[in-house]
Image (tube, grey):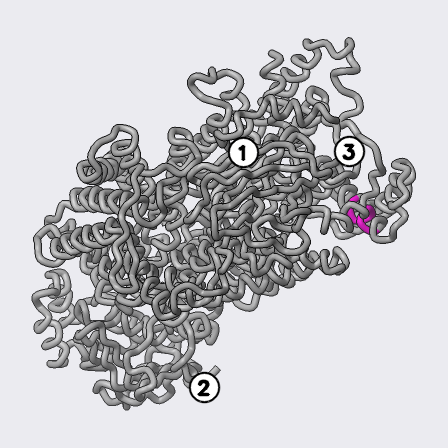
Amino acid sequence: MLLAPLALLMGAPPANAVVLCLAQADQTGCVTGTVGNRANPVEGVDVSLLDADGVEVDSLTTEADGKFSFQVTEAGDYFVSVGELPDGLEVRPPAERFQGPDGSIMVTVALGGSVSPDLNVRSVDFDAGGDSFGDQIIQSIAQGLRLGLLLALASVGLSLIYGTTGLSNFAHAEQVTLGGMVAYGLCNVAGINLWVGIVLTTLICGFSGFLQDFVMWKPLRKRGLGLTQMMIVTIGLSLAAQYAFQFFVGASQQKVVVRNFDVVELGPIRLTGMSFVAMGVALVAIGIVGYVLLYTRVGQATRAVSDNPALAAASGIDVDKIIRMVWVVAAGLAGLGGVFYALVVSNGIRWDTGMQILLLLFAAVTLGGLGTAFGAFVGAIIIGLVVELAGPLGAPGDLKYAVALVILIVLLMVRPQGLLGRAARVG
Amino acid sequence: MDTILSILNATLREAIAPNTAAVAIAVIGLNIHFGFTGLLNIGQAGYMLLGAYGMAISITYDIPLLFAVLIGFVVSFVFSLILGLPTLKLRGDYLAIVTISAAEIVRYSGRLAAFEDFTGGSQGIFGKDYQGPFISLSFLGSGRLTLLEFNYTDVADGARWVQVLGLIALIGAIVGAVLLLRSLKSAGGAVLAPMSSTVRSALVAVALVLGAILTVVVPAYADRDTATDIFSRVVAFVIFTSIMLAVLFGGQAAFAAWKTAKGRKAVLAGVLILFAVLAIFFTFPKTYDRTGVDGWWVRMIAWFIVGLSCAVVFLLVRSPWGRLLRGVREDEDAMRSLGKNVFAIKMQALIIGGMFGSLGGMVYVLTGTVQADSMGRSLTFFAYTALLLGGAATIFGPVLGTIIFFSARILIREASGAYIPDAIMTNSQTEQFSYVVVGVGLMLLVIFRPQGILGNKRELRFNV
Amino acid sequence: MSETTVGMADPAVRRQLMADVAQEPGSAKPDSILSVDNITRRFGGITAVDVNHLEVQRGMITALIGPNGAGKTTFFNLITGFDKPSSAGKGAHWSFDGATLDKTGASAVAKSGMVRTFQLTKALSRMTVMDNMLLGAKDQRGESLMRCMFRPIWSGQEREVEEKAAGLLERFKLLEKKDDYAGSLSGGQRKLLEMARALMSDPKMIMLDEPMAGVNPALTQSLLGHIQALRDEGTTVLFVEHDMHVVQHISDWVVVMAEGQIVAEGPADTVMANPAVIDAYLGAHHDTDLGDDDLLDEGADLGPLSETAADEEGSPPPESHDEGKHA
């Protein structure tokens, strides 16, 4: 009985390198989680796992991503105890039934399963209130615009793809992740200058769109595969891509650049300088797309294909070329969005960064009206604002994402064609 | 050889796991949505989660198991109404977006610290808080049980060659059954003569009597104290009677089919499949607790519910109502022009499929915890893969697809763990590799064999 | 059954009955089964349908003709509940067999006895021909979710419905195809199937949208026979058709639409001489193909349906697919 934890300690990896535990049926169980939360992880905290008798089984110190992960070989109750937190922070106390001795949190581990105790933190003086409510709102609006513009980068492409091919691309979020990953590889691993890296990333992602259309979507269109089936193909692609990211990069959060950006204060607004750059670049990129769509022959052709592909083909437009171009632009924009998202919003890139915002993208596109690029832009801004404003207005934690989705559902009830969609016959 | 056998052993363990059965039930529901009615529900995991919460939270408030299950159903019913009312009159994509969003809302809410007293927040509800009433229904007795009791270890002291022989017999039986079934398929469907009502009543009566006898005999044999509980007896009676019904009606059908050459082939295929199942457990005997949290009792109930669900779906889709579903899948306007209330049909399908989803969720948590993140989007995507693998719009496709899906993933993981050197793929990478294969598999499946294993290629030739 | 349908099989009776009806748009009929008022439908700035008043006589075959884009199919969609008039709530009113349909959905319209077919056939491809037929039957007990799992409740009715379906399939020469998937049928066979399926519900009135388009010439004749037989059995028929021979051959009354409006009504042999009709067709000359003009010329001298004319109709006129776009 005494030997078991000892053996575990010997076999376990060094305490400071967090290796993600994978539960194996009937053999091991896992206790994993994050100190703080994904957006604001807490680094350098000692986390230890105690068994039911209060004996320490394992311990480690969190790294930049705040993650901890323990593996156990016996099912039962354990306690997770957190050491000294950086000043001003405390662990939000769990519900009574999870409270263990000395502020630890109880978990029940089953073999073959994984549990994640909630180790969210708050500032000690959390109810003393920091900024005034009005300042919080203004700050949230700024963050909302930032999120909205970055979402718009991705959702405009998603909407263009839907408009020209009728395909709801569930793998579009992985294009966003791809952007962050490629930038991580170029700037962090290979050490290329950030700005060069961003341009290169956009090009590489655009090329990935070209490649996808060339290798997969065009042949599938030629095969006459139904839209539903195509949509399921994108689901498969999304799954494969997510785990491929994990396979190559690992499951932890990676930073695109190591250094931190300076914070710029504009009255009550505090954002990193990079945030303003990101917003500017997003606006310019979307502006260019909008200009091309409205005032150039290619844009006209794209809109014609969206309206009626058969008619467009009959009037001499090379539909395949237009669709290929849409894929390139969509993937490039999503990649660009991914880089900036990783730089200024999520503080790094993970295999599931894109997946986290996929529904926001769909919400933005649907909100604006399926298949209208400008609708997607407006929808994305609204969704960004809603998500960021939901927090100060009283939606706790991840519920802010849920609020955006609730708004989507409510809108569909009253205006199914979306905000900017035409009231065409439905069904 | 040892490595191969141990990989296969792990694969089989996954194939009969209660969680596999649970997902199979949810996939059966998804089949009603997507396969039969053409409803693009991408939130089946949300239904599962709601069913699990409905049942588990009710039990923690001391509501009897039966009512807790009913509450789980009611929750999913309400969920269907909320999802269906705004979207079923709109184009199909809207249902897809709303279902996936709603499922995520459920998951986010479940994880919310504010609801921790009900849902346990991100840790979820612990199994020990709600599993009690279910476990105490067991009539299997205590101790451990090996299936089959007679297995390779009983022949020649369990020499390796006996196990290998069993494996060869198993493969032979499966190949034979598949070949027979394929030759049947090309010959077209067999028509069974309708059964006279006298024979039917007689068979039902016999099944009831046998079921009652077994209900008395088996708990006595299992020597279990809690089996004296009246509900436990009722459960036992229902299970035994259903099994007897299946055996008797199956036997009668086999007897009737034996008269034609085609029927004989079908019966032979059935016998081969039975033999294959026996060969599986002869070669890889499985030992679990009779009753514990992760024992035979939960496996038996889980697979029994799978069988029952298949039977219900069979009755549903072979009726004029099932015809309505397929009609809606093909063309809603045509159905309207024939005076059918398309909205009502879609709503009914959404509700029924959702109930299977929530039932699947309830079974899913019988061995673990009710944790929101364990029933997220990926689970829905897995369900779609399983459905398409087995064959949409078939009766047994969802079950076969789920079993193959889950065991294939374990097979890939174990095999790549065993045969690919760590320098190329570390142990944790094999897990991810197995999921990559799943994703790519889903794509290839949809592109190259959209009808799945059991589906009808002919039926898919016409693009609508 | 209304008294006016008695003896409808006799052409003389029919002619007699319509003799007193004014040959002008929106004229009152002795016993109208369908009556339409103030229906307009606009798409963007274009007015597709603008019908002030129309009555359809019970027990007769009424043809609805007009150049392309005249709004015939849109008109069908409107009165069968598949589309909503722009004038809804602003004076639009239509009723069928005494019951008002202003707010009735498509399926309820069909249930009330007015069943339609589609210009582009809507066969349920991945279902067998027999299953297609069985879906047509009304009031099936087994279609209730509560009852469908108990076979004895519905098996008797199911057998009756199957017999009826087999009878209709026999009549439409589709019986040997009953176990084939509907998707494997030819275009003409699908038209037949759709019509047969519509008849499964014993409609009071059947609305056929270009029933002859794409039908094998050998079948055209028998299809016409079926339509006439339907009338003789008391079913009212309203159909859209481009083939003037067909129109002349079987219709008792012709309604002409142009640019969304009804421009003329009358018996087949006189309406084509109406200046408004000639205007409508010539005015729309640029988008009427030559086939129609030829037919119009032949139609003027009342030639009987000849084999050659039927042959020409074997391939569907190319314009027959355009109208969906306008709708």
Q: CA distance from mark 2 to mark 3?
A: 80 Å
| Residue that numbered label 3 is attached to | B289
* Circle 2 SS class: helix
Q: Are marks 2 and 3 on the same chain?
A: no
Q: Type of residue at label 3?
A: Asp
Q: Residues at marks 1 and 2, common chain?
A: no
Kindly identify the amino acid type of the residue bearing the numbered disc 1: Leu
Residue occupied by mark 2: C3
In the depicted view, which residue is nearer to us: C230 or B226?
A: B226
Residue B238 within the magenta-colored segment of the rendering: yes
Residue B265 % position (x, y): 63, 29
Q: Please state if B189 lies on the left or on the right of C301 as rendered.
A: right
Total numbered labels? 3
Taking the image as drawn, is residue C308 in sight?
A: no
Q: Chain of mark 3?
A: B
- Magenta segment's dominant SS is helix
Q: Position of residue A156 (x, y in %)?
A: 25, 53
User: In the rendering, at what x and y percent does residue C268 appear?
Assistant: 23, 76
Q: Quadrant of the C terminus of chain A?
A: bottom left
Q: Which residue occupies 53% across, 58% down?
A: B109
Q: Is residue A328 left or right of residue C15?
A: left
Q: Nearer the viewer, residue C56 or A36?
A: A36
Question: Residue sitting at 24 percent across and 61 percent down?
Answer: A266
| Residue at the limit of the structure toward the front, as seen here | A87
The residue stretch that appears in magenta: B234-239
User: How many neighbours does mark 1 have within 10 angstroms: few (below 14), some (14-19), or many (20 or more)?
Assistant: many
Q: Are marks 1 and 3 on the same chain?
A: no
The residue shown at (68%, 14%) is: B163
Q: Is residue A156 magenta?
A: no
Residue position marked by numbered label 1 in the rendering = A60
Q: Report in which chain the residue with disc 2 lies.
A: C
Q: Is residue C83 above or below residue B131?
A: below
